[in-house]
Amino acid sequence: MADDDEGGSGIWGILIFIAIFGVGNLILYLTTGVFLIPLK
């Protein structure tokens, strides 16, 4: 568990960022009907 700073934390950081950004994007879409990043 001591070498989590090697590469695992980077992957988790990206996954957490995508999760938070996705939820924020979903909430923004539900409230305003606009996506931060259009998926089309």
Image: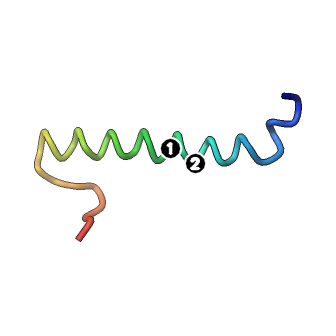
Instruction: Tell me the kind of residue under disc 1.
Output: Phe
Q: Vertically, is 1 above or below 36?
A: above
Q: Is residue 35 left or right of residue 17?
A: left
Q: What residue appears at the point 62 percent right and 41 percent down from the top-left corner? A: 12
Which element is circle 2 on?
A: helix
Q: Is residue 2 left or right of residue 25?
A: right
Q: Vertically, is 3 above or below 22?
A: above
Q: Say which mark, if any, is on residue 26.
A: none
Q: Residues within 10 Å of mark 2 (few under 14, many from 20)?
A: few
Residue 10: give x, y in percent of width and height: 69, 47
Q: Quadrant of residue 20?
A: top left
Q: Is residue 7 left or right of residue 36?
A: right
Which element is circle 1 on?
A: helix
Mark 1 vs 2: CB contact within 8 A: yes
Q: Residues within 10 Å of mark 1 (few under 14, many from 20)?
A: few
Q: What residue appears at the point 25 percent right and 44 percent down from the top-left corner? A: 26
What residue is disc 2 on? 14
Q: Quadrant of residue 2?
A: top right
Quadrant that contains the C terminus: bottom left
Quadrant that contains the N terminus: top right
Residue 18: give x, y in percent of width and height: 46, 47
Q: Residue furthest right?
A: 2
Q: Quadrant of residue 34?
A: bottom left
Residue 32: give x, y in percent of width and height: 11, 45
Q: Vertically, is 5 above or below 18?
A: above
Instruction: Tell me the kind of residue under disc 2.
Output: Ile
Count up the numbered dots. 2
What residue is disc 1 on? 17
Cα separation, mark 1 vs mark 2, equals: 5 Å
Residue 8: give x, y in percent of width and height: 73, 43
